[in-house]
Amino acid sequence: MTTHQVGYLIGSLAKDSINRKLAKALVQLVPSNMKMQEISFAELPLYSYDYDADFPPAARKFKESIAAVDAVLFVTPEYNRSIPGGLKNAIDWASRPYGKNSFARKPSAVIGTSPGAIGTAVAQQSLRSVLSFCNSPQMNALEAYIQFTPGLITDDGKVTVESTREFLRNYMVEFNMFIARVLQVLPRDA
């Protein structure tokens, strides 16, 4: 069985983010042939095309990290009915300069949690629009809009509600199968 290297981006830069807790839980629930690594974007300056000829070191490292994985999982909160500015900035860095888009043909999935009843549904739709433009094949089903309630996920990533744990485990199994299907049609070295 092929091992998939999956990078994940946590949309919130907050240390105590509930989406960081969700990411920790997802890492613990992956199939045995998925290897997860966080790709941080906390050190990125604001993107400007003035940098296209010579990216700063943090941006080069970030872009290389995206390019090195088989797929990307976005774990994002919802800020003002969209994605956080830092996450959008990171996507801009990785997709530039023109013709050197690190997301092109790279499978992706979107998930997030919020205290609200619809989770991060609106932010996810906003992010999907950006990823479509970046030519990233997206897992559109299973959708996952997680309402975060106190104690749902512990600080170390344990999901305390069995039905939620199984849903999240199944989500990661589905993402793993999606990655395999995409890479069969769009191999990384093509």
Image (cartoon, grey):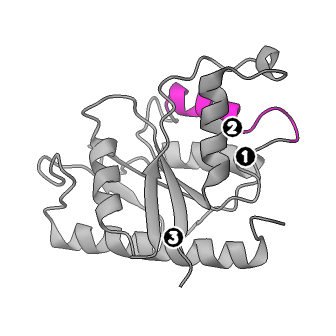
- Mark 1, secondary structure of its residue: loop
Residue 121, horizontal then vertical, whole percent: 46, 50
Q: Which residue is mark 1?
A: 102
Residue 110, horizontal then vertical, whole percent: 51, 54
Residue 32, horizontal then vertical, whole percent: 39, 76
Which image quadrant is residue 181 in? bottom right
Q: Which residue is mark 2?
A: 94
Q: Is residue 119 left or right of residue 64?
A: left
Question: From which residue to which does the magenta span run?
Answer: 84-99
Mark nearer the N terminus (2 vs 3): 2
Three-letter amino acid code at disc 1? Ser
Mark nearer the N terminus (3 vs 1): 1
Mark nearer the N terminus (2 vs 1): 2
Mark 2–mark 3 distance (CA, rounded to whole Å): 22 Å
Residue 5, horizontal then vertical, whole percent: 54, 62
Q: Which residue is mark 3?
A: 175
Three-letter amino acid code at disc 2? Ala
Residue drawn at (56%, 23%), measured in percent from left and top?
Answer: 44
- Mark 3, secondary structure of its residue: helix
**Residue 152 drawn in magenta:** no
Q: Tag 3: Cα neighbours inside 10 Å, few (<14), some, or many (≥20)?
A: many
**Residue 89 drawn in magenta:** yes
Tell us which disc is closer to us: 2 or 3.
2
Residue drawn at (51%, 23%), measured in percent from left and top?
Answer: 43
Characterize the magenta stretch by its predominant secondary structure: helix
Three-letter amino acid code at disc 3? Phe
Q: Is residue 151 above or below residue 30?
A: above
CB of mark 2 within 8 Å of CB of mark 1?
yes
Extreme-right residue of the structure: 99
